Amino acid sequence: MSEKIISKDKIKEWIDVLMQSHTVVAPIERKDAPAEFREIKPGDEPIIDGSKSMMPPKDWLLPRYETLFKVSKGAEGAQVEPAVPECKPTVMLGMWLPDAAAIRVLDRVFLDDKFKDPYYAARRENTVLVAVMPAEKRWSWFCNSVDDVETWKDSVDVLMYDLGDKFYVEGISAKGEEIIAGAYFTESNEADTIARNQVWDLFAKCDKLPFAGKALYDNLAWEDPIWAEISQKCLACGMCSYMCPSCSCFDIQDETNGLCTERYRCRDTCQFEDFTLMGAGHNPRNNQLPRSRQRLLHKFKYQHEQFGVVGCTGCGRCVELCPVNVDIRDVLTRTCSKERAEEPVKAD
Ligand code: SF4
Ligand code: SF4
């Protein structure tokens, strides 16, 4: 693993060189809207200091709306036009390390050996991930309470640390080493390494919450009074899962326009009333209680059973965005606390 320095005033030149061979994607601010991961075009001002983009990087790898195929009817019968994207090699810059760890969760879902998703795979397998550790702490983080964050470094190809007027840069994979081989990168010295360690410790050694290190998958119970309590507050707006960097649910719809039908998928969430509505009208999660329960059980119990890891990286987006202050940290703390009420509620 190489360890280098790049001055912030050289970043634009580095990106310009990368753009000759890659699509380069980074958080870019939009008028009156939060920054969003999209392809850098000439004149754009990408944000690559690792200050978390509220729109998650999955927006690029798993777009909110995507055509799967089109069927058109003509004189020669039905013609099927597949829409698997042809992707140029891509560099994604400026994501925060927990969001890269969330991409690892998406990889487990979409790059499974048995059910590989060709749309996701076309983008992901061509993408080099460059994460940045920001110089300032964010109040909603609880990453080191859900996992051993040291292991997350393997989620990325390059890891950069914001040292003020420069970045400390670690090449993690061979693909990562290739893109930091240019003349813009110089050798690091001992003072840089000390500064790098301080940025890392700000993230990795912040105070742990009471549930850290506990078997969350064993503590979240189906018949727990907390689901009724959450569901009474919840507005079912879906923000907590729609914006979550590791949530992966989508819906598939057909839209017909004259002689052409488009099949597309669009992001969906378990917090929406019609998410489990079946064609015949039955809805197994027909009120908010089972929907509130599903979000937590899926992340901390079912994904752990399926993949051996939890589906939350503690990024804090759902904590910041919930309009009624449903705080996942509080839910996990209480479900792991021995003092809490044990009175079960009737589910459904
Ligand atoms: S903190 Fe919330 S938004 Fe972030 S990964 Fe966990 S569940 Fe998703
Ligand atoms: S963000 Fe809050 S109100 Fe909205 S669905 Fe999630 S828990 Fe409910």
Image (tube, rainbow, N blue to C red):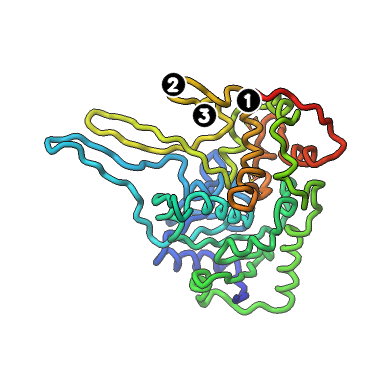
Q: How many numbered circles does the render carry?
A: 3
Q: Residues within 10 Å of mark 3 (few under 14, many from 20)?
A: some
What SS does tag 3 mark?
Answer: helix
Q: Residue at x 61, y 27 (%)?
A: 236
Quarter in which the C terminus is drawn: top right
Q: Which residue is mark 3?
A: 276
Percent position (x, y) of residue 164? 68, 64
The residue at 49%/63% (across/down) is 128
Q: Quadrant of the N terminus?
A: bottom right
The three-letter code of the residue at mark 3 reads Thr
| In the foreground, 46 or 64 | 64
For mark 1, what is the residue? Answer: 288
Task: Tell which of 166 and 103 is nearer to you.
Answer: 103
Task: Find disc 2 in the rendering and name its residue.
Answer: 280
Q: Amino acid at mark 1?
A: Gln
Mark 3 or mark 1, which has the lower sequence index?
3
Is ligand 2 closer than 8 angstroms to the Cβ of mark 3?
no
Callout 1: CB less than 8 Å from ligand 2: yes
